[in-house]
Image (cartoon, coloured by chain):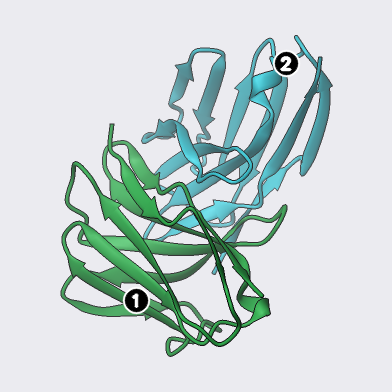
């Protein structure tokens, strides 16, 4: 099925730095979701966005639903070692589509 | 929040045998569940959608006779990998829609076929 374009593919950052990743689609979505997956585990929902322009925070995480409804971004502020993992965006229109993932490595 | 319980978390089987993976929604009803396959360092690829009380819908390229899906009740979906071969080794994950939270995922099953 369709996959969303997610960038960057991987990031290596120093602890304490901020992180930004985004997701784009050629289709309009009604819902954008951001998940984190730890090795050997299933994805865990971080933030759900339901309205164009919506900006939602969850602790150090902030995500926005793009005005065009074709994109979303996720920011992580003041990264810590436990932020390591793979982050996936997901969009839902008439179907549910996953992003290609962003692998985050935080260097202590 | 919603919980989807997936078992087993790891399984090693001999080539030619069948393996069943279970996915249960613990505190909500799921008329639909999704089954994904994930290769190392890659995204999740949707294999099929299971529907309670009706046949599963398979994505293009997924062999329905090899990956048998049964949605026996509003809280249970199973994926059976039949006559498994080493190329079937992968990480399998289920999920169920749980609005307004989105989609809740199971913890995944690491299948190794030897």
Q: Which chain is green?
A: B
Q: Position of residue A99 (x, y in %)?
A: 60, 50
Lateral position of residue A22 relative to residue A27, left or right: right
Shade representing chain A: cyan
Quadrant in the picture for residue A4 = bottom right
Quadrant in the picture for residue B53 = bottom left
Where does label 1 land, which residue?
Answer: B69
- The residue located at (66%, 52%) in the rendering is A100
Q: Quadrant of the C terminus of chain B?
A: bottom right
Front-lying residue, A96 or B53: B53
- The residue located at (56%, 84%) in the rendering is B61
Front-lying residue, A77 or A104: A104
| A71 in relation to B82, above or below | above
Which type of secondary structure does the marked residue at label 2 adopt? loop
Lateral position of residue B58 relative to residue B98, left or right: right
Chain containing the residue with disc 1: B
Which type of secondary structure does the marked residue at label 1 adopt? strand
Q: Position of residue A62 (x, y in %)?
A: 54, 20
Disc 2 crowd rating (10 Å Cα; few below 14, some 14-19, many 20+) is some
- The residue located at (28%, 38%) in the rendering is B2
Disc 1 crowd rating (10 Å Cα; few below 14, some 14-19, many 20+) is many
- The residue located at (63%, 55%) in the rendering is B43
Give the label on residue A18, or none: 2
> Label 1 to label 2, Cα distance in Å?
42 Å
């Amino acid at each position: 099925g369709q996959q969303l374009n997610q960038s960057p593919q991987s990031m290596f950052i120093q602890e304490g730095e901020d992180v930004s990743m985004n997701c784009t689609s050629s289709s309009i979505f009604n819902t954008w979701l951001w998940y984190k997956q730890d090795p050997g585990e299933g994805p865990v929902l971080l933030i759900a966005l339901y309205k164009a322009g919506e900006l939602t925070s969850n602790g150090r995480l902030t995500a926005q639903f793009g005005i065009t409804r074709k994109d979303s971004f996720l920011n992580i502020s003041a990264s810590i070692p436990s932020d390591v993992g793979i982050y996936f965006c997901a969009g839902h229109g008439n179907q549910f589509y996953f992003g290609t993932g962003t692998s985050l490595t935080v260097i202590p | 929040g919603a919980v989807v319980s997936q078992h087993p978390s790891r399984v090693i089987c001999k080539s030619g045998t069948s393996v069943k993976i279970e996915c249960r929604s613990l505190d909500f009803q799921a008329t639909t569940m999704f089954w994904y396959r994930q290769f190392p360092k890659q995204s999740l690829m949707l294999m099929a959608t299971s529907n309670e009380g009706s046949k599963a819908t398979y994505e293009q390229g997924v062999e329905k006779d090899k990956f048998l899906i049964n949605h026996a009740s509003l809280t249970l979906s199973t994926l059976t990998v039949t006559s498994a071969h080493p190329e079937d080794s992968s990480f399998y994950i289920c999920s169920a829609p749980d609005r307004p939270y989105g989609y809740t995922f199971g913890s995944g099953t690491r299948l190794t076929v030897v």
